[in-house]
Image (cartoon, rainbow, N blue to C red):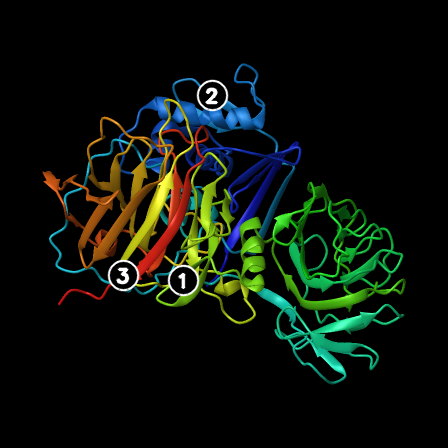
Amino acid sequence: MEGLRQKIYRAGTVEINAAERSVRRGGALLHLRPRAFELLVYLIEHRERVVPRQELHQALWPGTAVTDNSIMQCVNEARKVLGDDPRDPKFIRTAAKAGYQFIGPMDAINARFIEPVTPVAMVVEQNEAPTPASTRRAPRLRLPLIAVGTVLAASLLAAVSLKWRGQTPHAQGGEIAWWKFDEGAGQTASDSIHGMRAPFAPVLRWIPGISGSAVEFPGAALVILGEDPAILPRGSAPRTMSAWIRTTSTNADTTVIFQQGNPDLDSGSDHFYLALHDSGVAAFGSNNPILGRRRIDDGRWHHLAGVFEGGHKGLMRLYVDGDEDAAPVAANGSLRGDPESVFAIGRRLRGGTSFRGAIDDVRVYSRALRPSHIAALNRCMTGPVDIEISGHPYYFGTVHANEAQVLPPETGESSASIRNTGTDFAGVTFLSRRPDCPLASLRSADIGQDLSIELEIKFEPAPGLATEAGPYFRSRNAAPGDGIIGGTSAGFWVQLNSTGQVRVIRLHPMATIAFSQIPKTFNSRVFHKLEASARGEALQVWLDGSPVEFDSGGACCVLTVHLAPAWETATPRGFNEGGAGIEFGAGRNRGRAGGQWVRNIRVRSLRPAR
C-alpha cells in the first residue's frame, strides 16, 4: 500500500508534522487535542485565504451540529501551543464575522512518503445514549481489508477525520536491512533483506546468540565492512538502528557496534552509528552522539536502538532494553546525503578500536520507530509470557502513544498485570510471538470472535474524577502504539467505571450500546472481578460474580446485550480481525486522571452456539 505524504511545516521554532500529528516548539513535544490539531493543519493548508467558520464546521465536524464556541476553543488551543497572542497575532488571525486565517511565515515545508501514524483516540462521552441493536442475525467474524485512500494535500483534514483515526494500514514499512548472523558458519555475513554481503574474518567466531547464532569479536583490528548499494537511509532522512550486544569490556575506548554512511567521516559527512561508549554506556548519533545513563558492559545481552527523527536538527533518541535511556538530543551537522555509503559492524568505518564481545540481530529501518515498537521488539525477543490463551503463549504490546506499564505476574496470578501510568487512553493488545520477531509481526493476534475474558480491576483515588478499564475484543489488527478507540476499529469495549457502572462501547461507529445503573456504594480502591462472555451476537457480563443488568436498545434490566456488527455497513467500513486486549480511559477527564490497575487476566475461547 502506498504511504501517505508526510508534511512538516515549520514556522519559527514551531514544527507541525501533519502525518505524525505532532506539534513541537523549540524541540519540545506539545499536547494538542485531535480536533484542535486538525483545525490547525486545515488553516495551514488553506493559509492563502480566510477560512469561514461554516467551512470549518463541515470539515471538522461533518454531519454534526456544533456551535461556533467549539471552533473558538480549538483556535484558542492552537494559539496556546503556537505561543500566539490573539491581540497581536503572529500565526492565526481572526477575521471579524468571517473566520480565521493562518498568517505565520512558513520557513520550510518538507514532504516525503512514510506510513501514517495513528493519531490520538476519540473521546467516549460518559452519558452517551445507547444505540438500538441491529436486526442482523449474526456478525461477520472475519472482514477483508479495505484500502485507505491516498490523502491529498487539499483534502488533508477530511482524510484525517474519516480514514485515519484509530487505524494504521497493514502495509507497514519494516526492516530495510537485517543482519541476523544465523549463518552459524562460513566466511560471509549477509543481510537477509537485500543480500548485502560482507567478508567474515576467520578469527571471528560464530557463537549462540539472542536468537540463533551471533558473532563474537575478539577486540582485534577486525570489522565486517560492506558496500551500501543505495539501500540504507542517507543524509538527513529518518532512521532507526538496533542491535543486541553482550560484552564485559569497552576495550578501553568507544567502540562502534554498527555504523553506516560516508567513509570519509569529515565534519559535514553523512554517517550515523550505534556504539559502546568508553564509559560503558550506549551511544548513538552522528557528529554529536547521545549517551545513555546505565552501564551495559556487564556480560548480559542488551538490546540497543538509536532513533533519528529526520532533518538537519532532528531529534535523536537512544533506547536500552526497550526503555529510553537518555534525554533526546538534536542532531548537529550538515547531513547532506553523500553518494558514497558503506556499513561497518564491530568497528568504525575508518579504523579505530574494535568492539570486544558478541553482536547479534543488527537491523536498520528507514523511519523513526515509536517507543512502543521498540518496547514490543524487546519483549518479543526476550520471550516473556504475559498470558496463556488456549495453551499458547502471548505477550503484551502497548496500544496508544501513552505507555501502559506491564508488570510480571506475582505468585499465584494467572497473567502479567498492567497499570496505566498516564492520564489518558492507554492499554495493551495480545501479541503472539513469531520467529525472529520482525516488525510486521507486532500486531494484535487473532484470538477469535467467541470468547470469555475475565480480569480484576481497581482504580487509583481521583476525587471527583471518573476513569474506566476493561477488555476489548473483535477489534482490528493493531500495532503497538496505535489507537484502538474510535475510527475504523471494529469491535467492543466492556468497561468498568470507577463509579461502579458497567458500559458496553461499540468501537465503530462509536456508541454506547448498553449501560448499567451506578450503584449507591462502590469501593474503587479494591480489586473487582469483571467477566465478559461474547458468543455470536450475545454478550453477558458479570461483576464480582453477579450478572450485570443493562439498559440497552431502549429496554431496561436486560442480561444479554445484542452485539450488532454495525461496522459492516458503516462508511468507512470497520476492521474486525479478532484483535483483543485491555483498554484504559478517562472519557470525561482526559489528562487529569489515570492509575487503573488490571491483574489476573484469563481468556477462554468459546465455540459458537449451535
Residue underneath mark 2: 94
Q: Residues within 10 Å of mark 1 (few under 14, many from 20)?
A: some
> Distance of mark 3 from mark 1, alpha carbons?
17 Å
Q: Earlier in the sequence, mark 3 or mark 2?
A: 2
**Residue found at the very far bottom of the displayed protein:** 186
Secondary structure of the residue carrying tag 3 is: loop
> Distance of mark 1 from mark 2, alpha carbons?
57 Å
Quarter of image, res 35:
top left
Quadrant location, the C terminus: bottom left
Residue 165 placement (x, y as % from top left):
40, 46
> Which-is-in-front pick, marks 3 and 1?
1
Residue located at (70% from left, 52% from top): 236
Residue underneath mark 1: 388
Residue 209 placement (x, y as % from top left):
67, 71
Q: Earlier in the sequence, mark 3 or mark 1?
A: 1
Please give left or right for residue 225 compared with residue 162 in the image.
right
Q: Earlier in the sequence, mark 1 or mark 2?
A: 2
Amino acid carrying label 3: it is Gln
Q: Residues within 10 Å of mark 3 (few under 14, many from 20)?
A: many
Q: Are marks 1 and 2 in contact (CB under 8 Å)?
A: no
Q: Which residue occupies the foreground of this view, 577 or 167?
A: 577
> Which-is-in-front pick, marks 3 and 2?
3
